[in-house]
Image: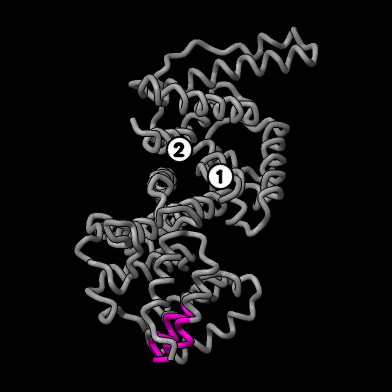
Amino acid sequence: MPAADVEDLLRQVAPQVLGAVVRRYGNFDLAEDAVQEALVAAATQWLDGGVPANPKGWLITVAARRLTDMLRNEQARRRREDAVATWELPRQQPDAGDQSANSDDTLILLFMCCHPALSPPSQIALTLRAVGGLTTTEVARAFLVSEATMTRRITRAKQQIKDSGIPFRLPALQERTERLAVVLHVLYLIFTEGYAATSGPSLHRVELATEAIRLTRIVHELMPDNAEAAGLLALMLLTDARRAARTTPTGELVPLAEQDRALWNRDYITEGIALITAALPRGRSGPYQLQAAIAAIHDEAASTEETDWPQIKALYELLLQSSDNPMVALNHAVAVAMADGPAAGLERVQTLAKDKQLAEDHRLHSVRAHLLEMSGDTAAAREAYRAAARRATNLPQQRYLISRAARLPDS
């Protein structure tokens, strides 16, 4: 198996392996170290000897052996020979296929990382690292902090989990409800990173988007009456439905207006629309339901020109009432431009540019460039596309923005 395929496989199964090891043997912090060592061993051995028939079972077995050594060393160092027996590992079969959907180890790990003993930023950071498979650098970018700061935050969160003695089990119904908002937010962030990677050679990280959808399905099955869980699943499906059309065969970005809608995943669209249609009448709509409703309007339209932009604008205005997220405001500015003309959208973008954090985000400059191009100011649009390209960290996005600038005249 090629090295890239081995890497993809390891990234996919790593959260499941960690969940299984923590569930069976406890000690979150040491379990993660043991799993990391197992992953390193697999990356070396599988390239030469081939991938085993049951990769996850192989990793769990190797991690369990390493964890045994770690625990024995730690206990010996602390002169707790009499406690060694308490860490004795039960006999196990290596296939690790003993999970049902409602006791999925990865889901339990997800709720564990979102325990109220941790601060909300720590909950999200730890889950993105342990469950989502993001690197510390990628998590740091999501929080707009340095890698060193994020490393310390994740380390503290793991220590808090260890010190708290949190049992590895699915929380009771009331606890699940209390933690659900953080769980959904984490899944949203994982999906977002998978659908539009912050950096790297590819626009997508399919394994992250797929895993986020899988976990959100489990949450929805576990809590079928929660409208926001249904809304998030609908949002993911309706958004991911466009993935095949978002890039050319060579990996170049294709904007929504130019996508071949015949390539969109109609099964995902049908399922997503059914979910959001059922969720919306249940009372006050939350942010995921509103975003899913917006995505549904896009997916139902035959073209950009036939899209119901006034309705999208109205939905973003509802979303703004419950969210001060600047990206929501930026998307609202685009909807305003499409509904009322580019000048109205540019006015809102100028206001948003006063936010120092958003002013350095490539997406603001990209939107400004697009609206300037719509208004006929090609010289200003060209410079705005260049400014966006300088700030983008994903290579397909950079290339797209550079190409947009190159095709516009200076005046």
What colour scheme governs how the chains and residues are painted in the rendered image of this protein?
Answer: one colour
Image point 62% across, 52% down: which residue?
A: 140
Residue 179 x, y percent position in the rendering: 58, 48
Q: With respect to residue 38, does 113 lie above or below?
A: below
Callout 1: 10 Å neighbours few (<14), some, many (20+)?
few
Quarter of the view holding residue 308: bottom left
**213 or 359, nearer to the observer:** 359
Q: With respect to residue 252, does 10 lie above or below?
A: above
Q: Main secondary structure of the magenta part?
A: helix
In the image, residue 368 lies in the stretch drawn in magenta: yes
Residue corresponding to mark 2? 11
**272 or 299, nearer to the observer:** 299
Residue corresponding to mark 1? 135
In the figure, is residue 263 to the left or right of 97?
A: left
Residue 275 appears anywhere in the view: no
Q: Earlier in the sequence, mark 2 or mark 1?
A: 2
Q: With respect to residue 243, does 165 lie above or below?
A: above
The amino acid type, in three-letter code, at marker 1 is: Thr
Image point 40% across, 26% down: which residue?
A: 47
Callout 2: 10 Å neighbours few (<14), some, many (20+)?
some
The image's mark for residue 342 is: none
In the image, residue 372 lies in the stretch drawn in magenta: yes
Instruction: Pick the quarter of the image with the N terminus.
Output: top left
The amino acid type, in three-letter code, at marker 2 is: Arg
Residue 321 appears anywhere in the view: yes
Image point 23% across, 67% down: which residue?
A: 260
CA separation, marks 2 and 1? 11 Å
**Secondary structure of the residue carrying numbered label 1:** loop
The reply to whether callout 2 and callout 1 are in contact (CB within 8 Å) is: no
Residue 228 x, y percent position in the rendering: 45, 58
| Range covered by the magenta-colored residues | 367-382
Instruction: Pick the quarter of the image with the C terminus.
Output: bottom left
